[in-house]
């Protein structure tokens, strides 16, 4: 058995019932085998892979709160502090009923490599809760966030661990979490990112993940002599990442024809009107179905199947494993030539293999959606300096970071004789910096 196979077998054995974590580790280890084989003796001596796949710390806690009926509710809360070799733990908080330790470990593990790719000094972490913000009043969300932070504050800090948003955690939740942190600790510091602009947030953080995704796709397109101009794009989800990916793709001349949520999808042959989507999703916290009620000619379909809509470029921006083998076969039949992941691990392993074998350009999430966390790191810099940069400054830095990530990923794939294999390129480039830092810092 090779070193990577040995480690994968050990991960499966020691972490039973964590399929998403196994999936993420397998994808990374498989594509690292070329690097590991060349340096096997060194890495074995340092127990590098054994240490890499084990989170430094898993914190799990009870989150009791009182709902609007006066009833006590109890949720599970977590923070996975995965790897701090290159900086303080950094990564989002997810509030969704599906949240469990396996999902947060997969997200924390991916975050380590993603954060390394940004070139900024941030380690990897992730956290969240099985709390479902859907249908809850603002007071209930506040009560939950205050209880969550009353436990979490012990483990985070501006130079220690800096959480941010993810599914179900946006500006409202970050505000309540920040308020409670400040109240308990008396500190006004950059302990969370994605903050509101009146209390230390960075311009462009809201847009950053979606914009960054489109910036890196633009680099992929340039390399093959194409552009967004005139392309038909399908974006999945209709949350933070999806909305701003659609916005930037449209600004670059594409027509975005579909969006979805967990209930169904809308198709608008004339191109999605984003002001209407923003009103439904960001203001009213409604369902994507309402788009078809508001826009004549738009069609709503209940259930899954957004991949049946013909497109040139497909940007999955909802959740893990949303895009499977049957779906990518349909994308291929319909002429789609590029898939880039706005979400974390939205493409199953079989689907990823199929894309590779069938010559569809593919950028994995840890590179494609890194603009969000990169801009979070820019928010940390601004907080430390006690300065705010203009939107143009932040956007220019974000753009450059995505251009640099594309170059690193593409270069690493070429160095290991796998040109165009951006999965391998992203994993290798992300891994190299973390591995060097871990070796330099000794067995800790
Ligand atoms: P939001 O909560 O803002 O939006 C999530 C969207 O995805 C919603 O439209 C939601 O629909 C939809 N969705 C969730 N689960 C499913 C499902 N099972 N089937 C279909 N649709 C679903 O989250 P974000 O936009 O922030 O996050 C989206 C993805 O991007 C996640 O994978 C996240 O980890 C990743 N990401 C986010 C970053 C950020 O900065 N926010 C940075 C990097 C990655 P519904 O309302 O019905 O639940
Ligand atoms: O998956 C991700 O990179 C995020 N949810 C953003 C993390 C962050 O710290 O901004």
Image (tube, rainbow, N blue to C red):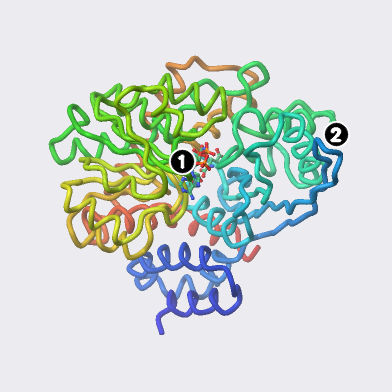
Q: Is mark 1 within 8 Å of ligand 1?
A: yes
Q: Position of residue 253 (x, y in %)?
A: 23, 24
Q: Position of residue 32 (x, y in %)?
A: 38, 65
Q: Nearer the viewer, residue 28 or 119?
A: 28
On screen, residue 113 above or below 210: below
The residue where tag 2 is placed is 184
Tell which tag, 2 or 1, sits nearer the viewer.
Answer: 1
Mark number, residue 286? none
On the rendered structure, is 50 left or right of 268?
right
Give SS at disc 1.
loop
The answer to which of marks 2 and 1 sits earlier in the sequence is 2
Residue at 27 percent of width and 55 percent of height: 328
Quarter of the rendering occupied by the N terminus: bottom left
Which quadrant holds residue 184? Answer: top right
As measured in the structure, the alpha-carbon distance from the residue carrying label 2 to the one carrying label 1 is 36 Å
Give SS at disc 2.
helix
On screen, residue 359 above or below 67: below
Which quadrant holds residue 273? Answer: top left
On the rendered structure, is 299 left or right of 157?
left
The residue where tag 1 is placed is 261
On the rendered structure, is 380 left or right of 429?
right
Q: Position of residue 97 (x, y in %)?
A: 63, 51
Residue at 28 percent of width and 47 percent of height: 339
Q: Position of residue 355 (x, y in %)?
A: 25, 57
């Amino acid at each position: 058995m090779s070193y990577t196979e040995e480690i994968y077998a050990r991960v499966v054995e020691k972490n039973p019932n964590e399929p998403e974590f196994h999936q993420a580790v397998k994808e990374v280890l498989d594509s690292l085998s070329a690097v590991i084989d060349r340096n096997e003796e060194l890495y074995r001596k340092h127990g590098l892979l054994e240490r890499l796949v084990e989170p430094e710390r898993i914190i799990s806690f009870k989150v009791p709160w009182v709902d609007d009926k006066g009833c006590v509710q109890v949720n599970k809360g977590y923070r996975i502090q995965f790897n701090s070799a290159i900086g303080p733990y950094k990564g989002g908080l997810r509030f969704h009923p599906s949240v469990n330790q396996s999902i947060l470990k997969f997200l924390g593990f991916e975050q380590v490599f993603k954060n390394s790719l940004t070139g900024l000094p941030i380690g990897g972490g992730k956290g969240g809760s099985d709390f479902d913000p859907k249908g809850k009043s603002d007071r209930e969300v506040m009560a939950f966030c205050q209880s969550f932070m009353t436990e979490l504050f012990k483990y985070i800090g501006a130079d220690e661990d800096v959480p941010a948003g993810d599914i179900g955690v946006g500006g409202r939740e970050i505000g309540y979490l920040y308020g409670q942190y400040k109240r308990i600790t008396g500190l006004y510091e950059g302990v969370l990112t994605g903050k509101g602009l009146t209390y230390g947030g960075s311009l462009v953080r809201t847009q950053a993940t979606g914009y960054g995704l489109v910036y890196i796709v633009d680099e992929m397109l340039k390399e093959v002599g194409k552009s967004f101009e005139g392309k038909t794009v399908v974006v999945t989800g209709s949350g933070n990442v999806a909305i701003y990916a659609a916005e930037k793709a449209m600004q670059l001349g594409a027509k975005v024809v579909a969006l979805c949520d967990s209930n169904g999808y809308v198709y608008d042959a004339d191109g999605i009107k984003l002001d209407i989507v923003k009103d439904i999703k960001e203001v009213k916290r409604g369902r994507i179905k309402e788009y078809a009620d508001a826009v004549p000619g738009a069609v709503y379909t209940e259930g899954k199947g957004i991949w049946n809509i013909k497109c040139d470029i497909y940007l999955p921006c909802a959740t893990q494993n949303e895009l499977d083998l049957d779906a990518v076969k349909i994308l291929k039949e319909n002429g789609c030539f590029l898939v880039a992941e706005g979400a974390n691990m939205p493409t199953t392993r079989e689907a990823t293999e199929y894309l590779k074998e069938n010559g569809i350009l593919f950028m994995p999430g840890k590179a494609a959606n890194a603009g969000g966390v990169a801009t979070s790191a820019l928010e940390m810099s601004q907080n430390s300096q006690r300065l705010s940069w203009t939107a143009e400054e932040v956007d220019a830095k974000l753009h450059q970071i995505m251009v640099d990530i594309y170059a690193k990923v593409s270069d690493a794939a070429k160095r290991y004789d796998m040109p165009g294999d951006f999965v391998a390129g992203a994993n290798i480039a992300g891994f190299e910096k973390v591995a060097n830092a871990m070796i330099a810092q000794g067995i800790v």
